[in-house]
Amino acid sequence: MPEPNQLDVTAFVEQQAIALDLPIADYQAGVTANFERIRSIAQAFLEFPLPTDLVAAPRFEP
């Protein structure tokens, strides 16, 4: 069983393919590998500390 807050990527891909009625059986290994890559890239962003007093801007102004 995965740790809390850990994603079983294979199960996630299988469940989403069923939910979205996507016929990805031939591509499932590649889709799963790409989701693993996305997960590892996103982890760096999730670990980045943000100040507690940060307020989101209502709109982007360059």
Image (cartoon, rainbow, N blue to C red):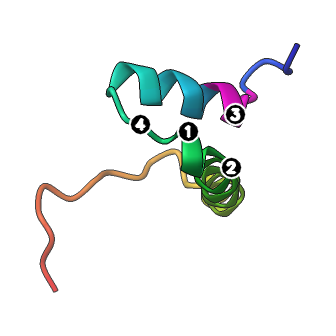
| Crowding at mark 4 (Cα within 10 Å: few <14, some 14-19, many 20+) | few
The numbered mark, 2 or 3, whose residue comes first in the sequence reads 3
Residue 8 in magenta stretch: yes
Tag 1–tag 4 contact (CB < 8 Å): yes
Q: Label 4's element?
A: loop
The numbered mark, 3 or 1, whose residue comes first in the sequence reads 3
Label 4 sits on what residue type?
Pro
The circle drawn on residue 29 is: 2
- Foreground label between 2 and 3: 2
Does residue 7 appear anywhere in the picture?
Answer: no
The circle drawn on residue 10 is: 3
Q: Nearer the viewer, residue 47 or 15?
A: 15
Label 3 sits on what residue type?
Thr
- Foreground label between 3 and 4: 4
**Residue interval drawn in magenta:** 6-11
Tag 3–tag 1 contact (CB < 8 Å): no
Residue 38 in magenta stretch: no
Q: Nearer the viewer, residue 53 or 36?
A: 36
Q: At x 33% / y 26%, what residue is drawn? A: 21
Query: Could you tell me residue 7's position as x and y percent?
Result: 70, 30
Residue that extends furthest to the front in the rendered view of this protein = 26
Q: At x 41% / y 36%, what residue is drawn? A: 23
